[in-house]
Image (tube, rainbow, N blue to C red):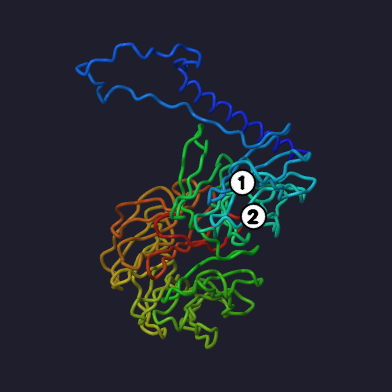
Amino acid sequence: MAFVSRREGIAAAVLAVVVILVGAVLVGCTDEPTPTMDEPTPAMDEPTPAMDEPTPTMDEPTPTLAPTFAQLTDNSDEDVLPAWSPDGLRIAFVSNRDGDYEIYVMNADGSGVTQITDNSDEDVLPAWSPDGLNIAFVSGRDESADIYVMNDDGSGVTRLTDDSGNDLFPTIPAWSPDGLRIAFVSSTSTWDTGIYVMNADGSGLTRLTDNSADLIPAWSPDGRRIAFVSNRDGNFEIYVTNADVTRLTDNSDEDRDPAWSPDGLNIAFSSYRSGDNEIYVMNADGFGLTQITENSDDDWQPSWSPDGRSIAFHSNRDGNFDIYVVNADGSGVTRLTENSDNDWQPSWSPDGRRIAFVSNRDGDADIYVMNDDGSGVTQLTDDSDNDLGPAWSPDGRRIAFVSDRDGDPEIYVVNADGSGLTQLTDNSYDDLGPAWSPDGRRIAFGSSRDGDREIYVMNADGSGLAQFTGNSYDDRQPAWSPDGRRIAFVSDRDGDGEIYVTNADGG
């Protein structure tokens, strides 16, 4: 069976590495012959060195002690892949002494060997949880290599991953320092190859990287980053990525347009999961999902009022797209705009008195502003190309938006009265979806400048551009949390558009 051959390959590789390392140590420590016990001992009447002979200086080489080795296991089969328990009192290891590879535990001196797994397939790659109460491992007992966890005595075996491919090779499952998450490598038929992170109970699966050359994840002590090995550039190098990317939604349809509530406790978004696009609200951790709108047409792009009591959105429920407002609990839908053209992409001003939006009522898409009751419509931009995606600065003095007036979509900013137009980005790719940081100092946006859409962050004047996410899939529509510590965004890194959240210092 292919899985067995992989296990044997791992064992052989580990043994080879051990032999090479031990050999290197022995060579380095035995350059000079060690005196044997039968060499003559100096006679007692040999002259004692005089007191005025020179004392050895401090910079003379200090003799090194030869390493000592203790054999802990002794049998005719293979014992491989040792893993110390966090308290240093026990060692888990893999052995085929019963005919197939199983997990064993012994005391640190080699005594008390106990077999803790027993099945006809292979159990390998044990990894202790930080509290020493559990052991994660990889097993082929269900016809594919998946990750399991068990108590340290072998009881309570629980399957954490369930896929028809392999969640192992060549990496031991890596527990986060707090014991709440496990990182691993997957090379499977339904998940794309790369490094994944899941909760310790198997929930919350999130892919961190998407390259088949990414291996051996290792957590930083604070649990915020993961270092890994990759030959994505042609040779093996060390990389690091943010470990705090969390998938908040998980369904086979498209979830998009994330918008944080002003108190940071909820995220509104639009989704096609009911057969047409509707507005939903969930807790900031992805739980507590509530459908806010429900009709046979499409509702898009929620924007919270600053007091958190209302949500603006655009809908074609009356034939063309117009701006509507609904209470945060889904009641009291009110139509704000009404004309024969399309009004869309509402954005509430920080003081709650105005709403910016896009309209093609003059023939092309431009930015408009109206009062929060729909009155006082004012056109801010007027160009023969398209101006889209208005986003208010936190102080309400400026509006960032996207325009293709120079030939491709770029980020611009304009004063709230329409004056002072400034172009912030300038390249031959698409820059979309600007979002201000709560302190007004930075703007996040999506861009295709590296070949696929990723999240970038720049200073509010366009300087200091930094790439925030990096993978071969599309990351887009960033939205800052009110405290500025997190960014929600949309990604199709798991096959369809879902909502993710990560720390604002990198995704």
Residue 82, horizontal then vertical, whole percent:
61, 41
The residue that disc 2 covers is 152
Amino acid type assigned to the residue bearing label 2 in the image: Asp
Mark 1: secondary structure: strand
Mark 2: secondary structure: loop
Q: As drawn, which residue projects farthest toward the bottom?
A: 332
Asked where in the image residue 303 lies, by quadrant, the reply is bottom left
Residue visible at 39% across and 56% down? Answer: 505
Residue 385, horizontal then vertical, whole percent:
41, 60
Mark 1 vs mark 2: in front: 1
**Is 127 rendered above or below residue 18?**
below
Residue 29, horizontal then vertical, whole percent:
46, 23
The residue that disc 1 covers is 107
In the shown orientation, is residue 320 left or right of residue 505?
A: right
Residue visible at 24% across and 21% down? Answer: 55
Nearer the N terminus, badge 1 or badge 2? 1
287 or 269: nearer the viewer: 287
> Which numbered marker is on residue 449?
none
Residue 276, horizontal then vertical, whole percent:
63, 72
Amino acid type assigned to the residue bearing label 1 in the image: Asn
